[in-house]
Amino acid sequence: MTNKTYHFNIGVDIAKQKFDVSFDDQRMASFENNLDGFKRLLKELKNKSETRVVMEATGGYEKPLAQFLQSQGIAVSIVNAKRVRDYAKALGRLAKNDRLDAEVIRLFAEAVNPQVMATASATQQALDALVHRRDQLVKQRAMEKQHLETVGNKEAVRSIKRTIDYLDKEIKRIEQAIKALIDAEPALTEKVERLSAVKGIGDISALTLIADLPELGRITNKEISALVGVAPFCRDSGTLKGKRTTWGGRAQVRSILYMAALSAVQFNPPIKAFYSRLVKNGKTKKVALVASMRKLLITLNSMLRNNTEWNPEHGNLA
């Protein structure tokens, strides 16, 4: 996939309350991480068609800014933090603070020309919000169920059960809202059906992938692996061959892929055979599982990109 080269690369180091911006070698600025801060940054961007704003994946703090900028026609790249850190080391920049990080992100963008993030539609943004809200509620329910196991007081038990009942109903309401969104857009329905046909990928996994990874099916397998954080980074030097590691990327997507891979290595024949072969060849189970996550992701990406179906017998793309 051809990636445009941008004349202006803006590096952003984003945190919960604020974000620091490196415009060029001389100009830095800080903004509040809210709508007012987003608008202030937008006013600073002069040639919008030739500008790309680049930030690291930070567990979700980057999403509101990225979505706002995209809605204003600004190109946005969200990059793997590991690649940026390695680039900083290559430059000999070992010092670390928010302002320096923003500058390194800008320099990294100028050197590497990272892939621009696909623009999420209004429906996709709504789906993203609902899927994440469901995830929050499910985690709250799990915590309440854990509390139930350790509480003996009857009134406390009744309180916990009432909370669980409320969360059950709220999760059901969110799921109904998600279904309504999917049903209203045939393209989304087709994507969910195509992805969930793969053993290990259920409807919720498919929805999370679609919501959190709009690039799925739009970029190369190598790019999608690096974006999610399942591409192995080598640690070789001379004759020393270090362990390959994965790092950074989109935590929510990796979490979904991890759970999907746990299921796939048991019930998905091609993934199971792939996993077993790696373990038989001496790979640790952890390494084999991460490789299975990557294989699963690449398969899903190829299916959407090539508009093909899952072949349950061989794992080939029919």
Image: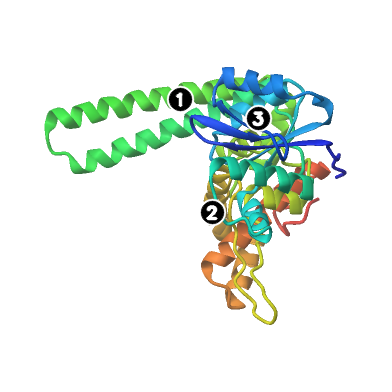
Q: Nearer the viewer, residue 175 or 226?
A: 226
Query: Element at badge 3?
Result: helix
Report if residue 309 is visible in the image. Answer: no
Badge 2 amino acid: Ser
- Between the C-alphas of marks 3 and 2, the distance is 33 Å
- Between the C-alphas of marks 1 and 2, the distance is 24 Å
* 82 to 129, vertically: above or below: below
Query: Element at badge 2?
Result: helix
Taking the view exactly as shown, the residue that stands out farthest to the front is 26
Badge 1 amino acid: Lys
* 24 to 172, vertically: above or below: below
Residue 84 is situated, as x and y percent measured from the top left of the image, at 65, 51
Q: Which mark is residue 108?
A: none
**Residue density around tag 3, few if under 14, some if 14–19, many if 20 or more, within 10 Å:** many
Q: Earlier in the sequence, mark 1 or mark 2?
A: 1
Q: Nearer the viewer, residue 231 or 216?
A: 231
| Residue with the mark numbered 2 | 263
Report if residue 133 is visible in the image. Answer: yes
Do the residues bearing badges 3 and 2 touch, measured as CB atoms within 8 Å?
A: no
Badge 3 amino acid: Ala
Q: Which mark is residue 66?
A: 3
Q: Nearer the viewer, residue 57 or 48?
A: 48
Residue 314 is situated, as x and y percent measured from the top left of the image, at 73, 59
Left or right of residue 306: residue 20: left
Q: Earlier in the sequence, mark 3 or mark 2?
A: 3
Query: Element at badge 1?
Result: helix
